[in-house]
Amino acid sequence: MISVGELISIFSELSTKNKKRLYAILFSVFSNHEEYKEIVDLLIDLKEDLLYSDKIDVKEEPYFTLEDFSIMTDLDIDTLEYLVKDLVPKVVDGTKTYSIRDFLNVYKKEELK
């Protein structure tokens, strides 16, 4: 049988996404067989430790400058500045950028008027 240390060592080298995948595979394969009950119990007991990661796998929401939005929408910069006046920009390398989701929300509201 595999030791706790070996199991944790295997998982520690993986990304968060791959940790979840491996855990799901191991759990599904071993949980269907009574002779692997010890491994399943070990997986259940160590789930939090095995899946732990100090890295966050988050899809970064796209942010664009007003110039980018101008190209995408054919709107002039003054109009875009009016549209985003209530939005909080994210400053990247000294440049104001805006979330695509936030921008689309205000853009759609203006289209409806």
Image: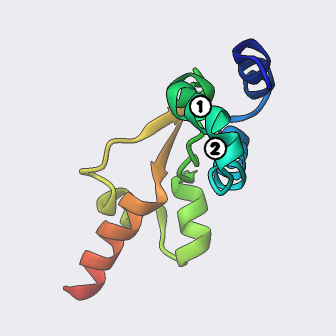
Q: CA distance from mark 1 to mark 2?
A: 6 Å
Residue where numbered disc 1 is placed: 51
Binning the other alpha carbons within 10 Å of mark 1 as few (below 14), some (14 to 19) or many (20 upward) gives: many
* Callout 1 amino acid: Leu
Asked if residue 79 lies left or right of residue 44, the reply is left
The first of marks 1 and 2 along the sequence is: 2
Q: Nearer the viewer, residue 21 or 100?
A: 21
Q: Nearer the viewer, residue 37 or 43?
A: 37
Location of residue 102 with respect to 94 vertically, above or below = below
The residue lying at 65 percent from left, 48 percent from top is 34
Asked if residue 24 lies left or right of residue 89, the reply is right
The residue lying at 48 percent from left, 74 percent from top is 75
Q: Nearer the viewer, residue 81 or 30?
A: 30
On-image quarter of the N terminus: top right
The residue lying at 62 percent from left, 70 percent from top is 71
**Image x and y of residue 100, in percent:** 48, 60
On-image quarter of the C terminus: bottom left
**Image x and y of residue 88, in percent:** 32, 42
Residue where numbered disc 2 is placed: 20
**Image x and y of residue 21, in percent:** 69, 49
Q: Are marks 1 and 2 in contact (CB under 8 Å)?
A: yes
Asked if residue 86 lies left or right of residue 75, the reply is left
Where disc 2 sits, the SS reads helix
* Callout 2 amino acid: Lys
Numbered label attached to residue 78: none
Where disc 1 sits, the SS reads helix
Question: How did the renderer colour the structure?
Answer: rainbow
Binning the other alpha carbons within 10 Å of mark 2 as few (below 14), some (14 to 19) or many (20 upward) gives: some
